[in-house]
Amino acid sequence: MVTVETKPAVKPKQPMRENGPYWEKFEQFAKIAEDPAWVRVARRAGISHFVELGFPTLQDEDWRFTNVAPIAKLPFKRVLEPARDGVTAQAPGHFTFAGLAGSKLVFVDGHFAPEFSSTAKLPEGVKVTSLAEAIAKEPAPVEKHLFRYARSDASAFTALNTAFFKDGAFIYVPAGQTVPEPIQLLYVSTAKEDGATVHVRNLIVAERSSQVTIVESYVSLSDAAYFTNSVTELVVGDNAVVEHLKLQDESHRAFHIAAVAAHFGRASNVVTHSIALGAKLSRTNIHAHLAGEGLECILNGLYLTRGEQLADHYMIVEHAQPRCASHEYFNGILADKSKGVFHGRILVRPGAQKTDAKQTNKNLLLSDDATANSKPQLEIYANDVTCTHGATIGQLNDESIFYLRARGIGLETARRMLIHAFAGEIIDRVRCTPVREELDKLVWNRLELNEKVTVNK
Amino acid sequence: MTHPILAIQNLSAGVEGRQILKGINLVIRPGEVHAVMGPNGSGKSTLASILAGRDGYNITGGEVIYCGKDLLELASEDRAREGVFLAFQYPVEIPGVNSTYFLKAAYNEIRKHHGQPELDAMEFLTFVKEKMKILNVPEDFLKRPVNHGFSGGEKKRNEIFQMAVLEPKLAILDETDSGLDIDALKIVATGVNRLKRPDNAQLVITHYQRLLNFIVPDYVHVLMDGRIVRTGGKELALELEENGYESILHGAAVPA
Ligand SMILES: Nc1ncnc2c1ncn2[C@@H]1O[C@H](COP(=O)(O)OP(=O)(O)O)[C@@H](O)[C@H]1O
Ligand SMILES: [Mg+2]
């Protein structure tokens, strides 16, 4: 099935919402949380917004292809205590990017695990720490940014996260500093019961003219139907150079909802990657706010689904200033009865002249039962702009397969080569070499897991 | 007489609702170079494609014996492993597949098929660099994705380069000359001539006589409307050049 459409979203009347036990849980939680007043205020606003918004339904234009009812129906069990017994000291070493040099923060079921974490020697003033710890000990730089970019009033999941988050990473790179090695954030789920819910909250601040690479990986040692709801606020100062990669490799019964709320300063250069491999249902909302003049960003993504998985990316690229370039590249490889959703909204604000916004979404269907939905949405309020978008949904190219076979390469190998090449287009954009190499290996291994893919004879 | 490399007997084939080849007969023996000439649309590429095993054609009659085997029974990769090579008229660009990786995979598949040990990356590179020198192929051919961003001429040269690496028993060149300037044509022809051995054969498909100044055929076949209407020596190509295909149709003798 194929849908490609261009039309502005219309916000429907709010239907009756399912709020479940959240308000009550919040009241219990608020009693025990030891937060400073500014956090408490935000949490309270979060729960009110959540109660108001409720979980989205298929009637919401922005959630038309992704049904989150199974998440709403989960018995909500916020993980209060980490179950450390499931994680040995070696466990984090088994996950992708384990071989990366540099600092690493590990979170087990949303709780910071210092025993698995290590911080390399970092340049003067660079902080790589638990967010909860930063709020408790050194709140000033956190308070300046936290809650400002990911807004609770616009998303029920962000609202829920704000109300309930326990911890996450805080990364701060002062002006002019370069962190030479990638910083790795590893979120391990060990959930033993269905409905176990973890709200991860991250804040990454790269000040003016700084440089840093951050890798966020969400992985699992569990096969429960748990729920990860993460929010990352990424603040990039003027002239800063930042690479951010988010890997979603949750268990195949898990639900994963994530928001990356990014704010880019003048003349900055940012690459973000969103790689979705796991989860039964995943949705990544990326809102890039191009807030300074003359910046360049690449928003890159790859989703691999099989079985009955669904991977959804919802992009908002907001050009608020002149002379900025944004380029979105998202490729999906969909096997079996799985589904890929891409919604790419490009918003060009009045005055954002000379905007150069490009969007490409390509989907490779490996089976007749796989589905791709691709929906570009352009809203342009400036007159001197270049905006292009293109979506393709198709199967492997028969001519290419024949060419490879005519050289002696077997049909199955030929197909795998082409599939890998399709993923490679995205992986090749990862600038940090060790990250790219590990990711390439991981994706290659995942593609090998696909059953013999349909062959049109 | 030696055993033929290729024996096509009364081959008829087409696509859904349309007959393209209407009874082709052609025997190629070791050491021979055959040229097939014919106007656009006469079925030259169809013949080449069927020999290489492209899907989508209905074989409605006849047979093709390659080195004693029923060629049409083999999957296209097995034909390649057995030594059939098609230099494509329109080589495909395959972005994302590295040329070295691709060529090494192809080469090793062929070796495996013959029970020979595979070459590792280093051994293969040494071997392939030698071939590049002989054919005057630029180094970056190997670094780029297969045919990706190549000019028309570069693609053709890449086909011959692959042929040099894979050392086929039967090379089928489908209009390898088209789109080449005279210098590129000479390079390609020199490459092809170097690969000629007493135990292999070449089937050179072309539209113009030009290429045959450089690759001298033992036999020239004229294909028109799905039939070989005349067969002769290399002088037939010159005759065609002078008088055109029409003269062949009108009045010329059809071989028995
Ligand atoms: N797959 C196909 N479907 C329909 N028609 C085809 C197909 N392949 C070839 N033909 C037709 O068969 C005829 C011979 O084509 P081709 O073999 O490419 O000729 P040549 O290579 O001699 O120019 C042409 O009329 C062409 O349009
Ligand atoms: Mg042709």
Image (cartoon, rainbow, N blue to C red):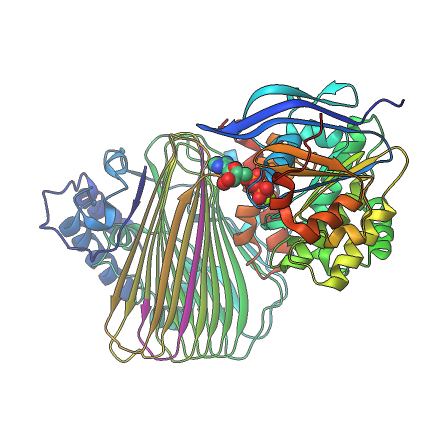
Kindly identify the residue that appears in the image at 56 percent across and 52 percent down: A117
Question: Do we see residue A440 in this rendering?
Answer: yes
The quadrant where residue B168 appears: top right
Residue B18 against residue B119 in the figure, above or below:
above
Q: Reply yes or no: does residue B159 show up in magenta.
A: no
Kindly identify the residue that appears in the image at 29 percent across and 55 percent down: A162
User: In the image, residue A80 lies at what x, y percent?
Assistant: 36, 42
In the displayed structure image, the side of residue A152 where residue A199 appears, left or right: right
Q: Which secondary structure is most common in the magenta stretch?
A: strand
The quadrant where residue A44 appears: bottom left
User: In the image, residue A191 lies at what x, y percent?
Assistant: 42, 35
View extreme (front): residue: B251
Kindly identify the residue that appears in the image at 79 percent across and 46 percent down: B235
Q: How many labels does the image show?
A: 0
Q: Give the range drawn in magenta.
A: A318-335
In the displayed structure image, the side of residue A217 where residue A140 appears, left or right: left
Kindly identify the residue that appears in the image at 22 percent across and 43 percent down: A25
Image quadrant occupied by the N terminus of chain B: top right
Using the image as rendered, state which of residue A332 and residue A46 is in the foreground.
A332
Residue B196 against residue A180 in the figure, above or below:
above
Using the image as rendered, state which of residue A122 and residue B92 is in the foreground.
B92
User: In the image, residue A20 lies at what x, y percent?
Assistant: 18, 38
Image quadrant occupied by the C terminus of chain B: top right
In the displayed structure image, the side of residue A313 where residue B246 appears, left or right: right
